[in-house]
Every structure is written in C-alpha cells, then in structure tokens.
Amino acid sequence: MKTHILGYPRIGSKRELKHACEKYWSGRISKDELLEEGRKIRESNWRAQLDAGLDFSPVNDFSFYDQVLDMIVMIGAVPGRYQEIIDKDSKAPGLDVYFAMARGKQENGIDIPAMEMTKWFDTNYHYIVPEFVQDQKFQLNAEKILSELEETKKLGVNPKPVIIGPVSMLLLGKEKENDFDKFELLSELLPVYRKLIHKLRENGIEWIQVDEPYLVTDLSEEEKEAYRSSYSELTKELDGIKLMLTTYFDDVSKNIDLVSSLPSHGLHIDLSRAPDQLDVILGKWPKEKCLSLGVVNGRNIWKNNIENSLALIKNASGQWDDDKLFIATSCSLLHVPYDLRLEKKLSSEIRDWLSFAQQKLQEVVFLKQAFLDPGKVQEELDANKTSIQSRLESKVLHQPKVRDRVAKLTSDDYKRGSEFAIRKKLQKEMLGLPMFPTTTIGSFPQTKEVRKWRSRFKRNKVSVEEYEKFILEETKQAIRKQENIGLDVLVHGEFERNDMVEYFGEQLDGFTFTRYAWVQSYGSRCVKPPIIFGDISRPKPMTVDWTTKAQNMTDRPVKGMLTGPVTILQWSFVRDDQPRSETATQIALAIRDEVSDLESAGVKIIQVDEPALREGLPLSKENRKQYLDWAIDCFRLATSSVKDETQIHTHMCYSEFNDIIEHIALMDADVITIECSRSQMELLDAFIQFRYPNDIGPGVYDIHSPRVPSIKEVTVLLEKALEVLAPDQLWVNPDCGLKTRKWEETEKSLLAMVDAANEVRNRGSV
C-alpha cells in the first residue's frame, strides 16, 4: 500500500512566492533571484513530504503563476500574438513571455493583452484559458519538468510527475476561430504527450499522475471518443512507466465504464467529495489495476475523521490487493493553507479541530499505519475520535436564536415589492442617471501606505482615532478622483477592508480567523479564507458608517458595498456538520440586516456581490437544480427587504453564464455587472438566446492586467455589447474591483472608460 498527494501549496508558507513575483515585475529583483526563490519553495515542500514519510511526491505541481499556463508552454500552445516578444534564439518562451501571457504587456511600444482567465471547476482558483486555432502546431518544451526532476534526485525524493491530460487540456481551452472543433487537434497534440512520456521514462519515472478532472463531468459522445482514442495512442510502448488517471471534485462512477476501458494503470478517485462512488468503482474497476483512494480532504481544513476514512480503506482492501491500493488526498493541497503550527492565536478548542497541508501529509501516512497495524497507534486513534466528537458537541457551534429565525422564514421574505419594470422607473426618477451610466465594481487601489496603516493598526501601533482619520482622508481622495474622472455612480473605495469576505467574517459571529492561512487565488493574488465553525449572526452594522461618510462627501450616489451569502460561503472554509444551504441561509439573514440598515441610512444603491455563484455550481448536472434553488433564494433573502426605489446591484466575474442565465435572472437584481473584456464580450452570447430582463454592466476592461486600455478599445467593446443589449440596459464598468491595481493605471483606465461611454452617448447609439 502506497501513500501520495496530488499537489502541494506553492506560494510559500508566508507568501514568499507572491512577494518575489511582485518584486520581479516591478524590477526590484533579478530573474535569477526569482528563480532561486522558486527553487527554495520546491525544496521546502519536498522536504516536508519526505519528513512525513510519503511514498511518492508530486513534481511539476509548482508554478510561478498557474499550472495550466505551464502546460500551455510545455505543449507549445503559445498564442501567436506573443511571438513578437519571444527571444528568437531560445527554444521556448522565457519567463517574461510567460508572465505576459498571464498579465499582458504594455511597454516600449508593445501592447499585448493577457490571455483569458476563468475559475478552476468549482474552486476559487483561477486558471489561464488555453487558446486553440485551426491547424495549430504543438511542440514539446519539457525543460521545466525535467529540471525539477533533477532537483528531486539531489534530495532523495521519489518523484511522481504531474501533468494535465490531453483531453482535459483541450476541454479547458477555447477555439479562437469559428467553424472549428478543438478535438481536431488531437492528432497533432498526442505526439507531443508521447514525447513527454518518453522523456519521463528516460528519467526512471515509475508513475505519472495524469490529471483528467473532466472525467467526473457529463461527457458528450465526442468527448468520450476523444478519451478512447487519446489513451489508446498514449499508452503505446510505455515500457514500464505507469499512468495514474486522476479525477477529483466529483463522482467518476457515472463514467466508470469509459474509464475502465482506457488502457491506464491506475485511477484516483475523490472520496471526500463523493464517498458513495466507492462501491460502484470497486465493482467495475479492473482488479489488476491500481486504485488511489482520496480520503483526506484537499479542499477544507477540518481534521480527518480517521474512523470514517479507515472504513473506506477497509472496504477497498476487502476486494483489492493491498499492493495495488494508494492512500491519498482527495485533490491537490493547493486549496488549503500550509501549516497549522503557524497559527499561534487560534483558540485551542478550534485549533484542535483543524488540519492544514502539513498536517494532511501526516494524516495520509497515519491512515496507512492505522490500517496496517491499528494496535500500534491506538492512542492516536482514540485522540482523533475524541477530537471529532468534541467538535460536534461543542456549545460554540449553535445559536438557538439564529436557528429559530431561519425556521420562521416565509415565501414573502424572498420577494421584492414590485416587478423590475416598475422599480426601474422609480429608480430612474430618483437617481437621474444618464444613458450608459458609468461606475466601478467597488474597491480602489490598496496602496502600500494603506496596507502599512492597516498592519500598524492591527498591531496596536496607532490608535483607532489615528487610523480612522487616515482612512477618511483616503476615502475623501477617492471620491474626488472619481468626480474628476467623471463617474456617475461612485464607491467609497473600501480602504478599511482587507478582503471582501474576510472583512465581513471578522464582524459576524460564527467565524474565526488565521494569520498565515493564505491560499492562492491566481498568480500572486492570495486570499485568507475565514473559517466558519458555527451558527452565523450579525451583532451590529458592518458598513453603514463608512458608506454614509462617503455619501456625505458628494452629491453623486455612492454605492453601499456588500459581499453576498453564497460568495461568503464559497470563499470560506465551511463547517461540514450541516448542509451548506443552511449555513448560506444564516449568512443571507446577516446580510439582509445590513442591507436594511444601509437603506435606512439613506443609501440609494446597494451592491451585493456574488462572484462565486457560478463557481459553486456542482459539476454533475443532476445536482445543479438543488444548488441553484437555494443559492438564488439566499441572494433574494439578502436583498428583498428594500423599497422599490432602492437599486440593488450584484457583480459576478470569471464565469460562464450560458447554462444558468435563467437562474441569474431569477436573482432579480436591478443591475448585474459581469467580467467580459478578456473574452471580448463573448460571455454576452448567453444573453442572445435569453432576453435578460434587467440592466447589465459587461466589464469593458481587464483589471487583472496592468495595461491601460485605449478609448477605441473600450468603445469597440461597448458597441459589441449594444449588438446584444438594449441601450437602456447597458451600464459601463471595469471587469472587477481595482484593489490590486496602482492609482496611475487606474485613473488612466477609468478616464478611457468614461470617454468611451461619452463617445457612444454622443454617437446617438440609442
């Protein structure tokens, strides 16, 4: 019986990679210094796995930005627009081209936009979307993975290279030309994969982890055939090297007949997300092949229930030879923080319930020990059982008043007073906004000075009065800048907020927080998810003070900015002792109270962001309706207490809407803003077939790239939007919040956006 994990966090235990990348991008460190920081992180990660006693350690799970982007480079699928900046003497794109693909490049007369980015299945991790064109050629660039294998030899690591499989790689990407099917490229792509496998075999590799997460989704016949033909071709002349087909995030049993027919040597299944699939797999997966049991949750931070995990392992062992079984994490540990030992200030009670990446390594190895010789570790088994039970029985989990309030909800609590057409007329009269009103999504640049003051305040280095005076001045400057730029609807800038979820969680009962529990969202962007351990309620108003102060600084409307219940749920580590829908409903009631207080304070526009609504959609279609029903209900519960004159906005980013557009309409927000610029308004295709009834603000420039759009560029996107939307539906805004940008590029970009809106107004495009 072997032990392994599918991947490890790569940002460094204290975000060393984030800081190194940002220093490199700003020219403060050299390329060699950045590469050295990456090497140190890899070595630290492998040593942790060696010390834990894992039988195999993943290689190629480290990335300077994104693992899909790494695969794009590895298979030679770099889009043509980057060719002009590729060093003609090099065999593969260098680091600067790599980062240009992720972030765009705008300097010395060069202006190249970044590649599109979207969510990695149902997680908050964002990946770079591959681009495919007809007659595309591929070539192998294996330097990264081979050099990392060399590093493992010096450490004594037993390496297991990790690659994204060819079918999932195509499914992750998009065709950039009409009348073209990306599966036509398989005949060109598969030889590159075979060359890679050959090189890995030459390096003495025993197992390759081939990630094929799409195997848990509802596959078309074309996609099934792509799997059959691909793996028939890939497994020719393997000469001893073995392929572990790796699935996660859902149940693969629906496709087990297909998977069993593929000529691979092993299969990994996610038993944390879908434990009931095991019996089906055991009945159909060939007994001569290996089976990897993902029993340690790679997506959440709760201590493993050893008793439950051992039951699954024993079930498999009863029908399988132990030497063909692997014990593993359910998915890559990319989605959890590094090490619980860093958290010195957590309460001892809650700390005892938790497990981060470092501890999950130990849980994987311990499960093997406990299965093979439980008598030797009986004391540890008893301690685990006691810890699990103490959490379930803890008094800090339950608030009777919260549960009573949920039980008394009625259908009227989920409905606005009047239909949208009536509300829109009243809101137009009250707000007096022009055609194509301009606004931003919420946050403004969190400068080094802002972060420094917040850090000093948290460490009690400045008083409450001094800190609030500083934040008030930053807010005042942001209001003046927005007025000078010419925006129609303003925001207060959110300078007092650390993160759009953490900020609210800090003020809600039922949450706890960490100091170093960072996880990667994309590139150098890291988030520190709150931990929801108990029932949720709002002791007092959370945003009213700063919003009303900002509104008093200007005659233009200032939006109240809130995070929605589903997003707070999705972007937290959520309690697993009750259905997620129950937790979301409790959050919705807390946000409802805040919405009501903002309205009472005179705020006329309230934005309740739900960027994670699409992210939470189950991968299996059969489970989607149930999720969407309660997710939409939670948004409506949070926002339906206001008068018709109060305008409710929501924001969603990096999501495909085609399959849920009707449910988005059911949210009944007066205005929805969405990410659209990287896809060149492609996401608006969803609105062609379905006539969305309310107002829409499709993002007109990409805030995740430092490049500044031209007026013409924004105008073209607005004209594209008007091909799909009615003029009186269209709002003008960036893709997302501006927290991560610098003021100089932000002001230039917003000026271009406002000028473009004025240009379209003046053309009479109405």
Image (cartoon, rainbow, N blue to C red):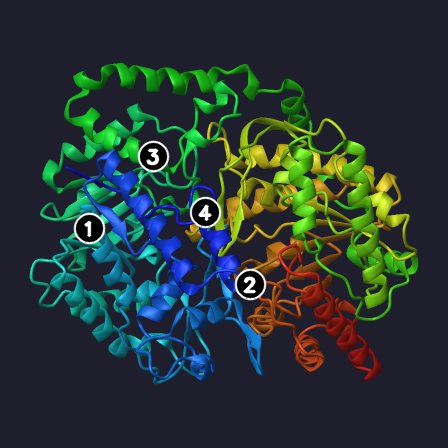
Q: CA distance from mark 4 to mark 1?
A: 47 Å
Q: Earlier in the sequence, mark 4 or mark 1?
A: 1
Q: Earlier in the sequence, mark 2 or mark 3?
A: 2
Q: Residues within 10 Å of mark 1 (few under 14, many from 20)?
A: few
Front label number (2 vs 4): 2
Q: Is residue 344 above or below residue 247?
A: above
Residue topped by disc 4 = 623
Q: Earlier in the sequence, mark 2 or mark 4?
A: 2
Residue 26 image label: 2
Q: What residue lies at 55% left-to-right and 71% top-to-bottom?
A: 679
User: The N terminus lies in which quarter of the figure?
Assistant: top left
Mark 3 residue type: Lys
State which quadrant residue 435 falls in: bottom right
Q: Residues within 10 Å of mark 3 (few under 14, many from 20)?
A: many
Q: Is residue 642 above or below residue 349?
A: below
Mark 1 residue type: Lys
Q: Residues within 10 Å of mark 2 (few under 14, many from 20)?
A: few
Residue 554 image label: none
Let me know if residue 217 appears in the view. Answer: no
